[in-house]
Amino acid sequence: MKYFITIGFMFLFKLGIGQDVKSVDSLEFYIRQLNWTSFEISNNYIPFLTLKDIGNRLVSLKDERKLQELLKNINDTNKTVAIHIILTKIIEPLKNEFSQYYEYAKDSSICTVRYSYNGLTWYYENKKDKNHIQKGNRSEIREYWNERIKKK
């Protein structure tokens, strides 16, 4: 009887830890998670852009399909900035040109913040509490990365 219990525990234990790691650490899973909150902007005297956990995992993930999958998803307006940052960290890690400009209303309140990172410009509208990218800029960035990935 004691052997049946032992075998039963071993079977249950195997079910708990025997899951395929790829199912948890997959490229598709991380790309689906990307959005406007996948990075943050710190304003300690000098504005600085950093990736959060999901973005950093994609940078370090070893998958030969990674660049093509990121490029496939770069037109998704909720993922464009995060993917642009990730591709920059992978392909051009020394390139880090970031700036932010405030546009003020007549009452001196901030109405729009314009951000720029290595050729991509996006806007945060304070009243709408919403980010957006102009379609033309999104197309330029897609073409830029398409060319860079072909050369790699």
Image (cartoon, helix red, strand yellow):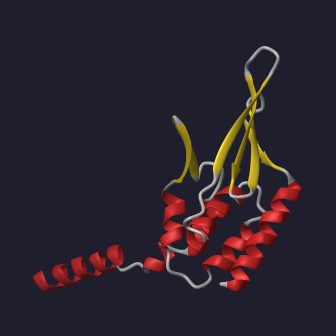
Q: Is residue 141 visible?
A: yes
The percent coordinates of residue 72 (x first, y second) are: 74, 73
User: What quarter of the picture does the N terminus occupy?
Assistant: bottom left
Q: Is residue 1 visible?
A: no
Disc tally is 0
The percent coordinates of residue 79 (x first, y second) are: 69, 58
Vertical side of 54 occupied by 17: above or below:
below
Q: Which residue corresponds to the image point at 49% horizontal and 66% vertical from the top-left? A: 57
Q: Quadrant of residue 82?
A: bottom right
Q: Quadrant of residue 110?
A: top right
The percent coordinates of residue 13 (x first, y second) are: 27, 76
The percent coordinates of residue 59 (x first, y second) are: 53, 69
Q: For this view, does 134 lie left or right of residue 108?
A: right
Q: Which of 34 and 93 is in front in this view?
A: 93
Vertical side of 103 occupied by 132: above or below:
below
Q: Which residue corresponds to the image point at 55% horizontal and 61% vertical from the top-left? A: 55
